[in-house]
Image: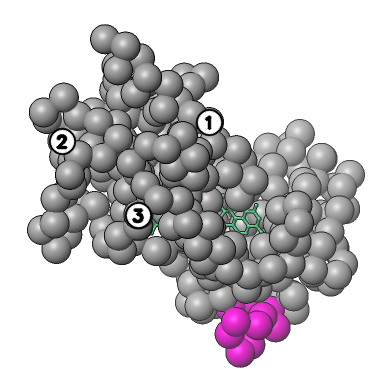
Amino acid sequence: MRYDAIIVGGGSAGLSAAQALARARRRVLVVDAARPRNRFASAMHNVLGRDGTSPLQLLIDGRAELVRYPDASIVDGEAVDATRADAGFHVRLEDGRKFHSRTLVLATGVRDVLPEIEGLAARWGRSVLHCPYCHGFEIDRRAIGVLVGDAMGLHRALMLPDWGPTTCLLQDGFEPDADAQARLQRRGVVLERSPVVALLGTAPGLDGVRLADGRTLALSALFAGGRVLPASPVAEALGCAFEDGPQGPYLRVDATKQTSVPGVFAAGDLAAPMHTVTAAVAAGVLAGVGAHQALIAADCG
Ligand SMILES: Cc1cc2nc3c(=O)[nH]c(=O)nc-3n(C[C@H](O)[C@H](O)[C@H](O)COP(=O)(O)OP(=O)(O)OC[C@H]3O[C@@H](n4cnc5c(N)ncnc54)[C@H](O)[C@@H]3O)c2cc1C
């Protein structure tokens, strides 16, 4: 069967794109590896109507809503390749299955590149955090540390005092200039130059960090991360153009969410410099509408 659209990635963006297309009574297939970026967190925030609820439950509900539409289906699996062929696209899964569609929506998200520090990965999304808007309120004004090795980390260090007393933990030999140091001081941020070598306490909780000079520092939360890469090589293989963002590369899309490759649309973290669930939902709907409009244009000849 030739689908009108294949959506690669069934997170907030992909399921939203699929819903828009299914509601337009188009044949739509979602291919999903089911590893959303926020799966490490037990609750999500800043998502109206779902504040404090499980991020995985949102996607379970989204899948259930989608398959109620007669022309929508979901397959579990990972797309390893997508090529342009037969007036559309062929998508190949890691188990060899192949699917064919007239348009593609890429919603594969990004993966976080984490600093390699003992005990950090085991706490990711629980006491090691990346976004204060998502998880800062729950720290409840207790002691916060922030790993700072570049300008993005510095930006985060300046924000964090709104959520709790903040220590800026300089890493990788990074040294803020005099102006940045003055701004940190005005925000009440304490500077610590001995790098963090290990996280302390029983994961996923955090009691503090051990520094390279042997001292320990009591902390309730540590902010880290900030660097991301596309979760899948499919967009690159198709030849889609990327932009440079503050956190990493992201797909260039136009107002209809079409990438630089005609017929290929994209939404969510993969195609945006800033990342939230609600932004992914909104962009996903627009990508679904964009793909639908392209189908209509092709039908008109
Ligand atoms: C720890 C953490 C906590 C967060 N908490 C919040 C929060 O509280 N509130 C908030 O608004 N945002 C939060 N975010 C950001 C949020 O996770 C993202 O903005 C959101 O998940 C983006 O949705 P998406 O659909 O673009 O990507 P994702 O949710 O990552 O979904 C992408 C989907 O595509 C699949 N996929 C990838 N490659 C392939 C492939 N080749 N073939 C098939 N499927 C594939 C993945 O397995 C996944 O299911 C958090 C992020 C992190 C890291």
Other-residue count near label 3 (Cα within 10 Å), few / some / many at <14 / 14–19 / ≥20: some
- In the rendered image of this protein, does residue 196 appear above or below residue 183? below
Other-residue count near label 1 (Cα within 10 Å), few / some / many at <14 / 14–19 / ≥20: many
User: What's the magenta bit mostly, secondary-structure-wise?
Assistant: loop
- In the rendered image of this protein, does residue 181 appear above or below residue 68? above
- In the rendered image of this protein, does residue 200 appear above or below residue 17? below
* 2 vs 1, front mark: 1
The numbered mark, 1 or 3, whose residue comes first in the sequence reads 3
Q: Quadrant of the C terminus?
A: top left
Disc 3 marks a residue whose amino acid type is Ser
Per the image, the residue denoted by label 2 is 83
Q: What is the x, y in percent for residue 280? A: 56, 43
- Could you tell me if residue 9 is visible in this image? no
Judging depth in this view, the residue of 244 and 169 nearest the camera is 244
Per the image, the residue denoted by label 3 is 73
Per the image, the residue denoted by label 1 is 286
The magenta span reads 199-214
Disc 1 marks a residue whose amino acid type is Leu
Q: Residue at x 67, y 80 (%)?
A: 206
The numbered mark, 2 or 1, whose residue comes first in the sequence reads 2
- Could you tell me if residue 45 is visible in this image? yes
SS at badge 3: strand
Cα distance between the residues tagged 1 and 3: 20 Å
Q: What is the x, y in percent for residue 164? A: 85, 62
User: Is 299 on the left or on the right of 55, as rendered?
Assistant: left
